[in-house]
Image: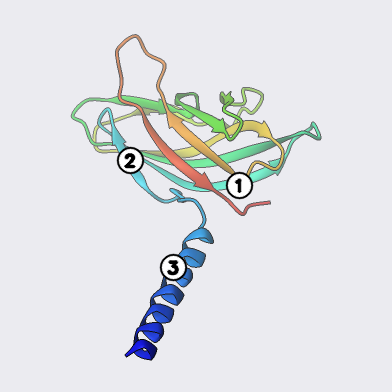
Amino acid sequence: MKKKRSWITLAVLSLVLAVTVIGCGTPKANDVGKTRTANNLEITVQEIELKDANQNDKQIAKIEFSVKNVGKEESGAGAGDFIIETKDGKKHQVYGMNENNFGDAIAAGKTLTGAGYYEIPANQKSFTIHYEPNTDVPMEAITWEITTTSK
């Protein structure tokens, strides 16, 4: 009986150890491709690409967005509505030196796609994207947790 109990204990401990090892190796959630809805807009972070910046300690995060207006009235969205928060807690606005940042009015039922460019510290692979439109009217805010292997 004692031998049977020790085998059961060994099996249970092995199972707990396996689950712990697997759980610790799991990377943080990656919300690329996930759609969030706020202010009658369905917003999807489609793709992330990290590129070298002109400064050694910086990189450019090129983030592809898709924004669908699911409301009944025209709305707008653009790269300036998004902020990148890096692991050090600092928030990074849209990189205004890039004329390719997207933004436009979106008719009801239509979709706007485009990229936003954000200058962030070099070697940042994980960050949070905040949708925080800067308006006089209170707006809903949403976030995506990003972990990328780009670059």
What secondary structure is marked by label 3?
A: helix
Q: Residue at x 63, y 52 (%)?
A: 150
Find disc 2 in the rendering and name its residue.
Answer: 36
Name the one closer to the observer, 10 or 148. 10
Query: In this rendering, which labeled residue sits more in front, label 1 or label 3?
Result: 3
Q: Is residue 149 left or right of residue 136?
A: right
Residue 138 in the image: x percent, y percent? 30, 15
Q: Residue flagged by tag 2: what amino acid is it?
A: Arg
Residue 71 in the image: x percent, y percent? 21, 31
Q: Residue at x 57, y 50 (%)?
A: 148
Residue 50 in the image: x percent, y percent? 65, 44
Disc 2 to disc 1, C-alpha distance: 20 Å
Q: Residue flagged by tag 3: what amino acid is it?
A: Val
Q: Is residue 67 left or right of residue 49?
A: left
Q: Is residue 97 left or right of residue 91?
A: right
Q: Residue flagged by tag 1: what amino acid is it?
A: Glu
Of the numbered discs 1 and 3, the one sitting upstream in the chain is 3
Q: Using the rendered view, name the quadrant where residue 40 is placed.
A: top left
Find disc 1 in the rendering and name its residue.
Answer: 49
| Mark number displayed over residue 19 | 3
Q: Residue at x 49, y 24 (%)?
A: 80
Q: Is residue 69 left or right of residue 133?
A: left
Of the numbered discs 2 and 1, the one sitting upstream in the chain is 2
